Image: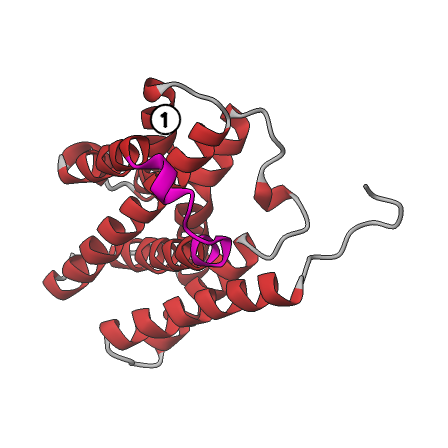
Amino acid sequence: MKPKSAGIIFALDIAGTFLFAVEGAVVAADAGLDAFGILVLSFSVALIGGLVRDLLIGAVPPQAIKDWRYPAVAFLGGIVTFFLHRYVVAIPRPVFITLDAAALSLFAVAGSEKALDFGINPLAAALMGTLTGVGGGTLRDILLARVPVILRADVYATAALAGAVAMIAARKLGVPPVLAALAGGLTCFALRIVAVWQHWALPRLPGAA
């Protein structure tokens, strides 16, 4: 893997890991889980998407297992949320939505970047970026016995896919990695924020609940 790309991926991964860990811990606390359950959700939401991505692209052992900093950051997010829960939940909902969109953007771009560096074709790389962004949240919903967000009419996985495609397209056009990552991240972030603001949703079948 190229040193510059590796540095970008690491920075994006760590930032996204902490943000998603906090989000997972908040959801777990709201669901009434105990301290262990909160840590499980913070770890799962933050790292499962990247772990599965690494297994699929042949980056073994996965970075989330090989590098102690990933689980440390994930558990840190859970611990901080546990002890400062009343302050964390006092954060306005728009801020939470913004942070979630930022984490989604970071993971979508980092996942696609890593897949490209491992020689994965652009289409599959975009899918790997999407998986990185939504994998943890999907497992979270399954563990809490909820229909995963990405299976409902919500512009969430679509935003991650759009950001991944934008980043890959920029790379193929010769844009420097940092600027390509920025373009992809902004695409995902903007689409997600506008979708929430304008209440955009994917089409449903007539009569669907």
Q: Is 102 above or below relative to 167?
A: above
Q: Nearer the viewer, residue 209 or 135?
A: 209
Judged from the image, the secondary structure of the residue bearing numbered disc 1 is: helix
- In the shown orientation, is residue 164 left or right of residue 148? left
* Residue under pointer 1: 38
- Disc 1 crowd rating (10 Å Cα; few below 14, some 14-19, many 20+) is many
Q: Residue at x 19, y 53 (%)?
A: 10
Q: Nearer the viewer, residue 41 or 163?
A: 41
Residue at the outermost right position: 207
Q: Quadrant of the N terminus?
A: bottom left
Could you tell me if residue 89 is visible in this image? Answer: yes
Indicate whether residue 35 is drawn in magenta: no
Q: Quadrant of residue 80?
A: top left
Q: Is 110 above or below relative to 169?
A: above
Q: Residue at x 27, y 31 (%)?
A: 83
The amino acid type found where label 1 is placed reads Ile
Indicate whether residue 96 is drawn in magenta: yes
Q: Residue at x 56, y 69 (%)?
A: 194
Horizontal and vertical percent for residue 96? 44, 52
